[in-house]
Amino acid sequence: MGVTVVLRQMSVIAILVCIGVYLEKKRVFTEQGTKLISKLVVDICNPVLIVSTILNGNITVTHKEFLSGVGVAAAVYAVFILIGSVLPMLIGIPKDERKFYSLMSIYGNVGFLGIPVAKAILPENAMLYVIICNVFYCLLFYTHGIITLSSGREKMDLKKLISPGVIMSILALLIFWFDIKVPDFIAKTADYVGSPTVFLSMVLLGASVARSNFIRDMKDAKLWIFILVRLVCVPAAAVLILRGIGTADETVRTFCLMCAVPVGNLPMIQAEKIGERTDILSRGIIVTTVFSFLSITAFMSLI
């Protein structure tokens, strides 16, 4: 992908994030207002964007390529789980903190950040693979993730799998697989509802960065070792392996992006809910998010 194209698209995203920083500094956002906008993005705009991409996009992926994408996604998450089990020990994370680094290794921000970025810089076919990754993410988090975070105290929360994001992801995959046609007005409505996702999610991200103590968080040396391995080495290895087995370029780029997205916020939300500490996850989210804008730009430009 051309450097100029990626830089232009990532610059747009960076400007949107800066708008969020500005609005937060000017105290335009309130805590309640931010929560309401987040809920709007997570429960309505983002899920509808997923379906809208299939309805209004020119998806040319074959069924065989789709099944291949499912296989790649399964392999990617298997590797994430392996890394999450081994990496915290290798970099000397204290035993009582390892589960947080394990979760950060596995559960990247494939939805809140991954979908808007993919929408901005990748071709339409890529969104199908992003949707697959989102389904895997949810299936794993509400089973493996819940148990890991609570050290086995909490049970799998299968009810949470019935969320707008999962429902719309599965609906989008069914629409693709069976080539379901819907009236134009429904497709157009979905397009209007999903369109604000990129702007709102990036503005919220900027507000989150503005609220953090980024300079303090950057001083965590072990976090930077984690970032080097998880956000640099893993995406690079994914590109080499996928290209080595003859995977199509758009698939390679998509899964490189899915490997390079920063730490997701769902583990931190769940940690708050069950009374676990959140400082490590919060620090990881902020630092990896800022770093990922550089790393994603570099990766997408080079491959």
Image (cartoon, helix red, strand yellow):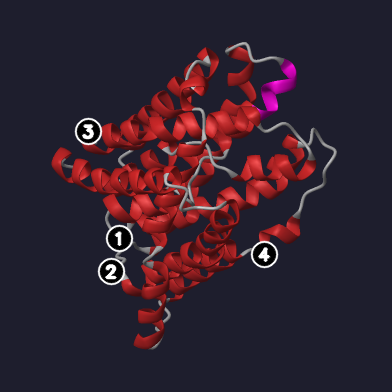
- Is residue 48 found inside the magenta-colored segment of the image? no
Q: Quadrant of residue 53?
A: bottom left
For residue 144, say whether it is visible: no
* Badge 2 density bin: few <14, some 14–19, many ≥20, Cα 10 Å: few
Q: Earlier in the sequence, mark 3 or mark 1?
A: 1
Q: Are marks 2 and 3 in contact (CB under 8 Å)?
A: no
Q: Which residues are magenta?
A: 95-100
Q: Residue at position x 72%, y 31% from top?
A: 277
* Badge 1 density bin: few <14, some 14–19, many ≥20, Cα 10 Å: many
- Mark number displayed over residue 141: none
Residue to which mark 2 is pinned: 58
Residue to which mark 3 is pinned: 302
Q: Helix, strand or loop at disc 1? A: loop
Q: Residue at position x 46%, y 24% from top?
A: 227
Q: Amino acid at mark 4?
A: Ile
Q: Main secondary structure of the magenta part?
A: helix
Q: Residue at position x 46%, y 31% from top?
A: 288
